[in-house]
Amino acid sequence: MMIRRIALGVVGCLGAAAMACSGSAGPAGPQGQPGTAGSAAPGGGTASISGIEPSTAFLARQPHVTISGYATSWTDKTTIDFGAGITVSNVHAASPTALVADLVIDKAAALGPRDVVVDDTTKETYSQGFTVSAPAVMTLQGTLAQGGIAFANLQLQDTSTPFDTTGSQDPLSGEITYTNLALTAPAGVTASINTATSNSVQILLTLDVDAVVGAADLDLLSGPAGDTTDALFPVAGGLTVTAQTATALGATPVSGNVKAAYDSALYSFAPASASLAIVDLTANSAASGANAGFALLPKSGHFADLLGFYEAADGAGTSATTTLLPSSTDPYYLIYWDNSGTTGAYTIGATSTAPASTLATTAADATIKGALSVTALPFVLTGGNLTSDTSIDWVKITTGTGDAGKVIHVQTEGDPYTDVAVAILESDGTTAIGGDDEGAPIDTTSTAVTASTTYYVTFAAGQLDFDPSDGTYSAIIRLE
């Protein structure tokens, strides 16, 4: 606002009826007292910055700002400095006391208030007059360490730019793919979106065993792919990865304790020899309401090579198991994680057993007459390869005199995409006493068996999702 200052003079007036007098002048009177000095006229003052609009802006944004001044004489040649991480362009003096300019705020600019300096014939500083804020704030739950699992939640702060939740939903699983949200995470960290709304995004973070230790950025880009108007939501240095050493698993289960919701723990298992072995991996939680589970990684320790995540069959239980058939001494990594957020004590272990007998599938075992005959249990079937939707392998088992009341336990292992249908049959080869329609991997048991009786187990191509390019499998049969 311009203030016009008006100086008012005092004028003496003679009465309209005053009359001129004639005659000679009289003698001079005595000299009067001197008058007092007048006040200085207003209009001066010290040049200063009186305001910035907007006074707050977000990382990775390009705001247009107006700077107001008092008693300034700014021109288009006046320079403006907002500090490190902010580039100023298109400076224009709308008047001697008003500047407009465009800013580009770097995604890694320091957050918080900062000084603004305007330099012309004089230099004016507006102390702490402009604030840089994060467009989204991140909170973490879980273990942000090598071989860890964590949740990140991004809460929107820049309400002028809500998250773009455009996506498509899988009709079977109900999972939503958010096509207009893209995450960029550091090497060794996989970031995937669980759920998203216009003002918050929940992210699952999985960290490879060899993820780089130290602080790194997590960036979320919101908007159609390739659109120049996409909004960036950076979290500079928001992921600080710490080092973690795996605890080796041996013959005795290891005890652990989840102290904070969604924390994880890293373990390793290395077979003692390169001979084929049946290795049972088990995690058990003693906590009420727990959902014990573990992620299994091969020797790479990378989640891109994930062998599977194992939990209770109903998704809520205190025990998780899977079985491996290693034939080398290459290590495996197990990451214990309770995805229910329950805390408390747990155990995790690996038990290795040598198979009592093994056989490889043959072309002749496609019928009951050519069934492979198991001589001793536990048994491992190798070389399974379902080449068409009519493929099937038959295996014959004969129980012993002391096996009454036991169950036949069948598991498949190998290609995680092989769709296998398992059936456990009576000696007639048609009456089912157990099995699993299909899936990968299979883990199923029969009803109680009788002693000294013949039973059959068949491994056939599944009818729902079978693909010959994913037809290989191995199998384990035990009496328990």
Image: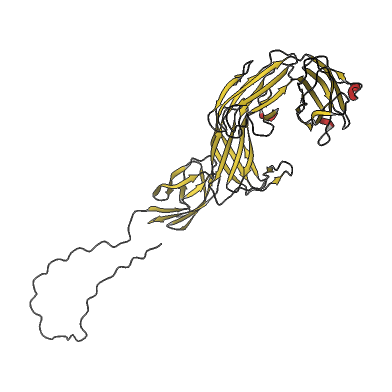
Quarter holding the N terminus is bottom left
Percent from the top left, x then y, of residue 316? 64, 34
Percent from the top left, x then y, of residue 473? 80, 25
Number of numbered discs: 0
Query: Front-most of 178 and 452?
Result: 452
Query: Front-most of 131 and 399?
Result: 399
Residue 62 visible here: yes
Position of 66 with respect to 203 (left or right) is: left
Residue 229 versus residue 218 in the image, above or below? below
Residue 218 versus residue 128 in the image, above or below? above
Q: Residue at x 7, y 77 (%)?
A: 27
Position of 72 with respect to 301 (left or right) is: left
Percent from the top left, x then y, of residue 327? 74, 17
Position of 194 with respect to 426 (left or right) is: left
Quarter holding the C terminus is top right
Q: Residue at x 8, y 79 (%)?
A: 26
Describe the colour scheme in one phrase. secondary structure
**Residue 292, image quadrant:** top right
**Residue 457, image quadrant:** top right
Residue 298 versus residue 466 in the image, above or below? above
Q: Residue at x 59, y 49 (%)?
A: 162
Residue 73 visible here: no
**Residue 295, image quadrant:** top right
Residue 133 versus residue 468 in the image, above or below? below
Query: Front-most of 3 and 319?
Result: 319
Percent from the top left, x then y, of residue 268? 63, 20
